[in-house]
């Protein structure tokens, strides 16, 4: 049997956390032969609920789960962790300005970046889910100067999966028939789900659907999907977000499928002309815990304008949090 | 690729249902090579929330999920289904007598039994989770006279898993080190979690813990675990219940591990002197969708008294619902 790995999940008693931890404990993220230790981190006010999550993890009798640590102390939560999944974030409340939300979360992710830098294992990999995810990943990485920036990512996999789901539905195919979906940019309304490089059963997606459908129906639907789920459920997406987290981490660590890629928000290294120093969602291919941005995809004028709009938004977010970018 | 199977889940928009459907969709119940069609059944008032669950299933981009049917019509929900998982039940509300709860649910499960009898596939297997689970399974089976009674079961796997978790914790072992746990009787406060036949790392459990610990601490803790989780979380067990459902169905269909058994509430056939015509939790070994009650375990006086108390309670429940037992 392999040695157990340590996985830290923040916000573990929240809706997404509750949908996530049991799937991780059951082995869905890293496989049924990989024992694990869960370190669940919460804010002090959620410790009672977190205790309940811990009880239910005991009650799940998961063979791979060697230990569970429940804590509100980042030094304990991130100690020697191999994978840090940062789900917890301050939600936007009524009457709150977007800028206030960004600044409140900037403080949280700066602190977590420092704690990861100090306490995590040398090989730690970090996924930021809490919003604004791209900018929070930038802040966390800036506060963890000893950790290579390529070990940080932010999640656009939920958008990617939503795009697969809607394209499969429209073309009456299965998601497994679709390859090379891309979501570019910020995990926000400026994201750009791009089907121009997709293949469905080996044929270009634009042989199956029109460009007009993509622009008039598909793109806005993916961008606004979160609000539509809240409308229907009365609660935000939790199970689908946790499914995307499982997919993101599994593919990052165990590798993307052959002839396919996935979308991850990673440090912009100049690829596709995006300013260095932002976290930007790109098509990536992963092998053994490393990602490589897919290069040389052709972008038409429409695509270029979309990427530029998302880059512009990310630059504005960056400007707001500039003072959190020095550890 | 195998042909897709049809799985019906009732109460799919409730807490347990929401924790369950995504694990089923991801292939955890029947394996990563088994495509499936989900039929999600809800009461009319929950159809908007169910629609949200359906949207999130699309957004999960699950490769095995070939179709999702959302309905409040049992004729559609159970049509040609291979596996019916009956989670939805009327919860006990404040000031409600236990008898009223039992009678309200009796009507629901009688109707579902008739619908399953009429619409399900010939090979259908039914798991009842909604409480009172044992008696609801009895009612559903009585209203499905064309389906062998051995295709019905009620869930005591959550109790079984809780017992594994607590015994592992006490003995500082892993749940995978423990074999032959048994939960006898009704899924209620009269259940009897029995460690007398358990082996831990190949040695009798009673070499690891005392009989006094089992009686004074272990048994009451398992019996009252549900209330303790509610106390901590402010919500009832959902993720651990869904984990137990996955385990129950997987083991029933794909088989129990070698040299081990699991607990399932099944039709009492006279084994261990329990009156025929009740659903009673026994240790069972499963192969290819059939179960066999483990025979000839020795019961001491304490155990016999516990089984008798649970049988007595089940007889009382049966007496209350007698009029629902004729289709």
Image (cartoon, coloured by chain):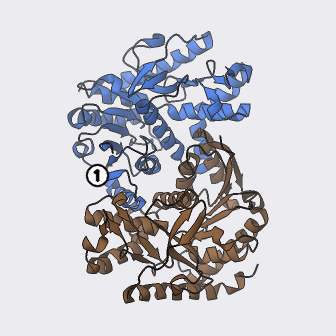
Chain colours: A brown, B blue
**Residue at x 63%, y 18% (from the top left corner):** B196
Residue B227 at x, y = what percent? Answer: 58, 40
Image: A168 above or below A274: above
Quadrant assignment for the N terminus of chain A:
top right
Residue nearer the viewer, B234 or A294: A294
Q: Which residue is mark 1?
A: B69
Residue B155 at x, y = what percent? Answer: 46, 32
Residue A202 at x, y = what percent? Answer: 31, 64
Task: Describe residue B33's horizontal placement relative to residue B304 as left or right.
Answer: left
Q: Residues within 10 Å of mark 1 (few under 14, many from 20)?
A: some
Instruction: Determine the secondary structure under disc 1.
Output: strand
**Residue at x 35%, y 23% (from the top left corner):** B150
Quadrant assignment for the C terminus of chain A:
bottom right
Residue nearer the viewer, B154 or A77: A77
Quadrant location of residue A75?
bottom right
**The disc numbered 1 marks a residue on which chain?**
B
- The count of marks equals 1
Quadrant location of residue B79?
top left
Residue nearer the viewer, B241 or A86: A86
Asked whether residue A327 appears in the rendered view, the answer is yes
Residue nearer the viewer, A298 or A85: A298
Asked whether residue A231 appears in the rendered view, the answer is no
Residue B168 at x, y = what percent? Answer: 67, 33
Task: Describe residue B81's horizontal placement relative to residue B265 as left or right.
Answer: left
């Amino acid at each position: 049997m392999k040695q157990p790995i340590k996985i830290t999940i923040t916000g573990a008693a929240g809706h997404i956390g509750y949908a996530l931890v049991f799937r991780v404990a059951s082995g869905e993220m890293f496989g049924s032969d990989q024992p694990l230790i869960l370190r669940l981190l919460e804010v002090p006010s959620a410790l009672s609920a977190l205790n309940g999550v811990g009880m239910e993890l005991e009650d799940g009798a998961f063979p791979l789960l060697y230990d569970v640590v429940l804590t509100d102390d980042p030094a304990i939560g991130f100690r020697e962790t191999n994978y840090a999944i940062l789900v917890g974030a301050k939600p936007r409340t009524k009457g709150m300005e977007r800028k206030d939300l960004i600044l409140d979360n900037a403080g949280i992710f700066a602190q977590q970046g420092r704690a990861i830098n100090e306490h995590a294992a040398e090989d730690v990999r970090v996924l930021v889910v809490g919003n604004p995810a791209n900018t929070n990943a930038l802040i966390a990485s800036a506060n963890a100067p000893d950790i290579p920036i390529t070990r940080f990512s932010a999640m656009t996999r939920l958008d990617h999966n939503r795009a697969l789901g809607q394209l499969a539905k429209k073309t009456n195919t299965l998601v497994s028939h679709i390859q090379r979906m891309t979501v570019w940019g910020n995990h926000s309304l400026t994201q750009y789900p791009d089907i121009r490089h997709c293949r469905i059963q080996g044929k270009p997606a634009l042989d199956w659907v029109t460009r007009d459908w993509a622009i008039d129906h598909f793109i806005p639907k993916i961008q606004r999907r979160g609000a539509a789920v809240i409308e229907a459920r009365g609660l935000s997406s939790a199970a689908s977000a946790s499914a995307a987290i499982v997919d993101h981490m599994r593919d990052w660590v165990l590798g993307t499928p052959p002839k396919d890629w996935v979308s991850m928000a990673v440090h912009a290294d100049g690829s596709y002309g995006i300013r260095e120093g932002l976290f930007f969602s790109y098509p990536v291919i992963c092998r053994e815990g490393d990602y490589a941005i897919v290069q040389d995809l052709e972008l038409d004028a429409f695509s270029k304008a979309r990427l530029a709009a998302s880059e512009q938004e990310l630059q504005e977010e960056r400007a707001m949090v500039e003072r959190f970018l020095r550890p």
